[in-house]
Image: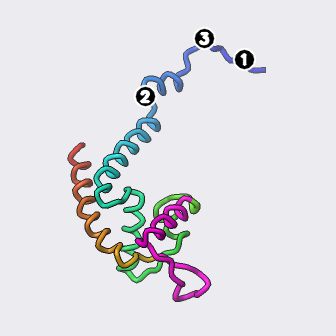
Amino acid sequence: MHRVNRDAPNSAAQAAMQGGCLCQAARGAARAITRRYDAGLAAHGLTVGQFSILAVLAAAEGQGAPVNVRRLSRVLDLEQSATSRAVAALTCSGWVIRAPDPRDGRARVLRLGDGAWAKFNAAARTWAELQEAEVARD
């Protein structure tokens, strides 16, 4: 049986406690950046996650490529259940519409609601400013 020597230094524990874990540092940096984007986009009534969904749908509509929840999940690298919940909230607000897929009437595709285009365009200007500010932080 393997016995643990609790007196021996544990480099992983020490790194985590001293802020030396790269994964922990990257997650903290991502949360800080997300907070800054959320604060900037709050003026538009959006979080950065919601803005990302609107951006994907706007791009897809511009290319004439319908997007369903599964594809949206892949593009955003999110679990499908999380994507479905986020889309449901945007649907309740009228910013996203679920419509029959023109190729398969049983399936549903997502598109921007009528008021979402103005919201997205205004938020996109703020997003561009946030992008510039993040690049300048380096």
Q: Which residue is mark 3?
A: 7
Which sits in the foreground, 57 or 135? 57
Point out residue 15 in the picture as x, y percentages from the top left corner: 47, 25
Residues in magenta, as a range? 82-110
Mark 3 residue element: loop
Q: Please give left or right for residue 104 compared with residue 58 in the image.
A: right
Residue at point 46%, 31% (across, down): 21
Image quarter (top left, top right, bottom left or bottom right) of the N terminus: top right
Q: Residue at the front extreme?
A: 93
| Disc 1 residue type (three-letter) | Arg
Residue at point 51%, 81% (across, down): 99
Q: Quadrant of residue 115?
A: bottom left
- Specify the label residue 116 is tagged with: none
Which sits in the foreground, 96 or 76? 96
Residue at point 40%, 75% (across, down): 112
- Specify the label residue 20 is tagged with: 2
Mark 2 residue element: loop
Whole-number angstrom distance, CA of label 3 to CA of label 2: 21 Å
* In this view, 105 is above or below 113: below
Q: Which residue is mark 1?
A: 3
Image quarter (top left, top right, bottom left or bottom right) of the C terminus: top left
* In this view, 63 is above or below 92: below
**Is residue 105 located in the magenta-colored stretch of the structure?**
yes
